[in-house]
Amino acid sequence: MIRVRFAPSPTGNLHIGGARTALFNWMHARAKGGKFILRIEDTDLVRSKKEYLDEILHSLKWLGMDWDELYHQGERFRIYRDYAQALLSKGLAYQEGQAVIFKVQPEKIKISDLIHGDIEFDTSLIKDQVLIKSDSSPTYNFACVVDDASMNITHIIRGDDHISNTPKQIILYQALGFPLPEFAHIPLIMGAEGRLSKRTGATAISEYRALGYLPEALVNYLLLLGWSPGENQEIVEIREAIKKFDITAANKTASQFNLEKLNWVNAQYIKKLAPEKLLELVKPLLLEKKYIADNFDSNYLLSVVKLFQERITTLADFADYSDFFFKQTLEIAPDARKRLEARDYSREFRLLIERVDGLESFDHLSVETAFRALVSELKIKAAELVHPVRAALTGKTIGPGLFELMEVLGKEKIRQRLSAFIKGGV
């Protein structure tokens, strides 16, 4: 049976690169009917923190990656020391104080990487390897080999920044008499200016969640960073992707993280949501900002959601773009204020209030009919009134269609907000 592992260190949050590695391992396991093992590499007793572990586990669950088995290296120190002692007993290692060090013998090592093909290493370029440090904790490569072998890991799928560790691990596999797994080294994710940095996308998964990205969209995008479902398909649901996934088809060259592309993918997933589902996703953000209370009118909120669903890129956009529907005191953006101060619109606003108040049927079609009749009577172009009215009602210069948002806003708020810009009152 195929058995793969993702082995994060709880010395920091789960970032894009680690999440992509976890995803490729999880996909390989699910595509082949195998097992996905989660191993927490918490041998660094000083830097390992519970809050990082919690964030990693939470982020993996949020992304939809479930695991079949969970191990903590911090609970396995005795196992590592026993294997180190076995190498000492065979004369393959030596001690310096409390440290145990493996004697590296010169040889040529060749592997057939599932992504890069044949790779050859010369161990004469590798110095003797520390197995157990003087504080009795195991080194990364030694613990890795012992765990991968004892957990029956068949495929090691990881970033190609680990290629240099491969020969150091293979010589330990050989010395301990363990069968070699297959290796697949995934090219790194790069930023626009080289290595991925926080500025170019190396943000914690939990931060992407807070910014309003959907887990399905983020997983879709991570898949595209190193693998393609074919036929230039860019939106692929995870269940369909699993049917097609083949680790040997992963890209051989680095992928570039593109925030604009991620935003586009996320927007596509938002558009596909049922409006009722989107309402449930944005509601916590509105509650957090105190725009609404728990007992807020859900029909009103659903109407607002429908207005913005085609326009937003992230869930956070909804809270930013739609705030004028929920705030009692309107904030006027500088560009909107400039529109309103271009001239005195008191007469036009007063007449529009009268027309709106007089409507028996209040919907966007009747509002538009009344609005266009008014501008025709005033002998002005519709745009001459559309822009200042939008600025007065929303505090913004862009947004959903004016007549659609007026329908949702309602007569009372329209009257209140236009009146605020009529000199001398209504």
Image: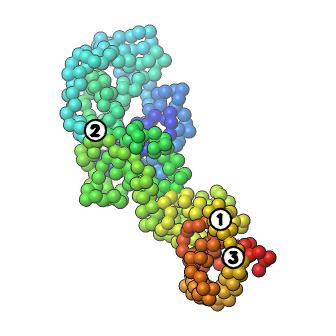
Q: Earlier in the sequence, mark 3 or mark 2?
A: 2
Splitting the image into 4 quarters, where does residue 116 fall?
Answer: top left
How packed mark 3 is, by other alpha carbons closer than 10 Å (few <14, some 14-19, many 20 or more), is: some
The answer to whether residue 303 is seen in the rendering is: yes
How packed mark 2 is, by other alpha carbons closer than 10 Å (few <14, some 14-19, many 20 or more), is: many
State yes or no: discs 1 and 2 in contact (Cβ < 8 Å).
no
The answer to whether residue 295 is seen in the rendering is: no
Q: Amino acid at mark 1?
A: Lys
Residue, x 52% and y 31% (percent of image)?
Answer: 48
Marks 1 and 3, how far apart in space?
13 Å
Residue, x 57% and y 80% (percent of image)?
Answer: 382
Q: Amino acid at mark 3?
A: Tyr
Residue, x 35% and y 18% (percent of image)?
Answer: 129
Residue that numbered label 2 is attached to: 184
Specify the quadrant that holds the C terminus: bottom right
Image depth: mark 1 or mark 2 in front: 1
Residue 401 lies, with reference to residue 281, above or below; the image says: below
How packed mark 1 is, by other alpha carbons closer than 10 Å (few <14, some 14-19, many 20 or more), is: some
Residue 180 at x, y percent in the picture: 25, 31
Residue 362 at x, y percent in the picture: 61, 85
32 sits left or right of 314 in the view = left
Q: Which mark is residue 398?
A: none
State yes or no: discs 3 and 2 in contact (Cβ < 8 Å).
no
303 sits left or right of 347 in the view = left
Residue that numbered label 3 is attached to: 345
Marks 3 and 2, how far apart in space?
68 Å
As rendered, which of 41 and 261 lies closer to the eye?
261
Q: Earlier in the sequence, mark 1 or mark 2?
A: 2
Residue that numbered label 1 is attached to: 338
Q: Amino acid at mark 2?
A: Ala
Badge 2 element = strand
